[in-house]
Amino acid sequence: MRACQAPIANRITLLRDVDKDGVAETRTVFLQNLNSPFGMTLVGNKLYVADTDRLISFPYEAGQTSISAQPTKVVDLPGGTLNHHWTKNVIASKDGSKLYVTVGSNSNVAENGMDKEEGRAAIWEVDAATGNHRIFASGLRNPNGMDWEPKTGKLWTAVNERDEIGSDLVPDYVTSVQDGAFYGWPYSYYGQHVDERVKPQNPALVAKAIAPDYAVGPHTASLGLVFADGKTLAAPFNEGLFIGQHGSWNRKPHSGYKVVFVPFNGGKPNGAPVDVLTGFLNKDEKAMGRPVGVVNDQRGGLLVADDVGNKIWRVTSAKTAQ
């Protein structure tokens, strides 16, 4: 996916549905003067925000409509003037002691040199108390959405794979993330399929590359990811994961531009993806919207952030006729 060219507001906006009718009544500037924020997660009374170049935290009390406190830096993240995949996401471990941060590559296939890829194409594990960090998994070209699979407790992520080797290669994917695993980028894709464009090669690393769990289509730009909580949508959408597919920029015909659901059984994908929310392309194949984040709203709805339509959509189960 190409880097976003639109101006970034550098703020977080708070929307509140006070009367619980599924429509936000209040809108306030919650945080400002950030630096291309993307991911955020609340742990107790501490809000973590993943800026493009650092992970920071803020104190938070229930009911606040804005935060004016200065941020506390947890850890610096790869950024700089060359910052190809700028989005950084963050999720906390169940006990809140560890934070997992996605850091995309600084290129398509390392054409800027591997020295520009230090700490990138990876998921970091960060100690919340000290900021000490390590690479949890690597070789992930551009990981974005993350969530914990409810039955196994495994971390899953959505990954955007490489471009410019055809409309049908390489499929983006969702996968469980193994501690210490290498997923191929830039030397190989989908396991040990070597990308001959990358010079010099690294056969030793390719031999260690593992294949991801589930392909979600080439160039779909799958970003958001959240597991069904069993309460949001009725069967068959009660066990599996939702994916926000931002959509292709370099494929004919277009791919993505929708939210899909991947059914699971026993903690693993079990069946073909099912469309949940579509209609983001008009009859001329122009984007009227592009899904990004997806999250359960704990009130029976799936929220979908749309960064072209500039909307938050709410998807609910169809009401049963009385």
Image (spheres, rainbow, N blue to C red):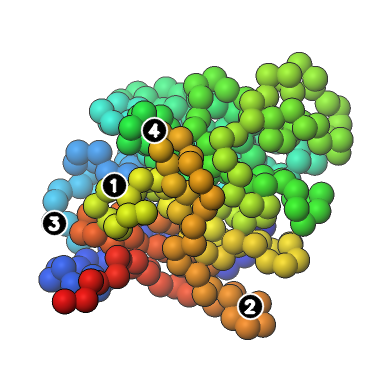
Residue that appears at 33% across and 67% down: 314
Question: Upstream in the sequence, badge 2 or badge 3?
Answer: 3
Check disc 3 and report the residue beneath it: 63
Residue that appears at 59% across and 49% down: 216
Residue that appears at 21% across and 76% down: 321
Circle 2 SS class = loop
Tell us which disc is closer to us: 1 or 4.
Answer: 4
- The amino acid sitting under disc 3 is Gly
Question: Upstream in the sequence, badge 4 or badge 3?
Answer: 3
Work out whether 308 lies above or below 171: below
Tell us which disc is closer to us: 2 or 4.
Answer: 4
Check disc 4 and report the residue beneath it: 266
Question: Upstream in the sequence, badge 2 or badge 4?
Answer: 4
What whole-number distance in Å separates the C-alpha atoms at marks 1 and 4? 14 Å
What whole-number distance in Å separates the C-alpha atoms at marks 2 and 1? 33 Å
Question: Upstream in the sequence, badge 2 or badge 1?
Answer: 1
Check disc 1 and report the residue beneath it: 229
Check disc 2 and report the residue beneath it: 286
Q: Quadrant of residue 205?
A: top right
What whole-number distance in Å separates the C-alpha atoms at marks 2 and 3? 40 Å
Residue 121, horizontal then vertical, whole percent: 61, 36
Circle 1 SS class = loop
State left or right for residue 150 relative to residue 182: left
